Image: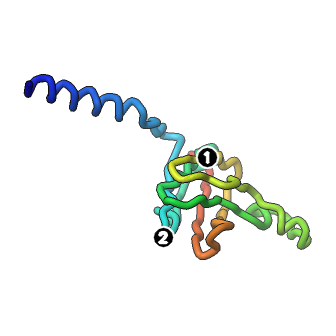
Amino acid sequence: MSKVIACTVVALCLLGLGATAAITPDEKTVQITDKGFVPDRIEVTVGQTVIWHNTSVKDHTVTARGKLPGGPELGQEEKDKPLFDSGSIKPGATWEHTFTKEGTYEYMCRMDKSMTGTVVVKAAK
């Protein structure tokens, strides 16, 4: 009986590991919690992907507005257009964005504007 239980536990662990997406060196992960983005500041290099994983029980967004870092000043209408916007991320779901330009990107959740974060993108080495 104990061998059956041990085999079942091992099988369930292996299934759990197989269900988890592997993070590659070109990816970094940010958790979306009920209290904010963790970490709330992350550094990547040009070409890297950031994956936001909603571990909260509520829907959230990842939205960056304003001008591209190093870009020209924008009019108000252009400032209102998001640089990137995840749309609604359901609990348990993920959203990803690959950064192609250097700079500092400040983002927030449109559903809870007190939740903010920063992605600093540096030149690839």
- Residue 116 versus residue 11 in the image, above or below: below
Residue 106 is at least partly visible in this image: no
Separation of marks 2 and 1 at Cα, in angstroms: 20 Å
As drawn, is 115 to the left or to the right of 103?
A: left
Quadrant housing residue 19: top left
Which residue is rendered at x = 52% and y = 44% of the image?
27
- Residue 23 versus residue 28 in the image, above or below: above
As drawn, is 106 to the left or to the right of 82?
A: left
Q: Residue furthest left?
A: 2
If the image is split into quadrants, where does the C terminus sit? top right
The label shown at residue 96 is 1
Quadrant housing residue 76: bottom right
- Can you tell which of label 2 and label 1 is closer to the viewer? 2
Residues tagged 2 and 1 counted as in contact (Cβ below 8 A): no
User: Local crowd at mark 2 within 10 Å, few (<14), some, or many (≥20)?
Assistant: few
Find residue 50 and report its horizontal and vertical position in percent: 57, 49
Which residue is rendered at x = 73% and y = 55% of the image?
84
Label 2: state its secondary structure: loop
For badge 1, the amino acid type reads Glu
For badge 2, the amino acid type reads Lys
User: Local crowd at mark 1 within 10 Å, few (<14), some, or many (≥20)?
Assistant: some
Quick one: label 2 or label 1, which is nearer the N terminus? 2
Residue 5 is at least partly visible in this image: yes
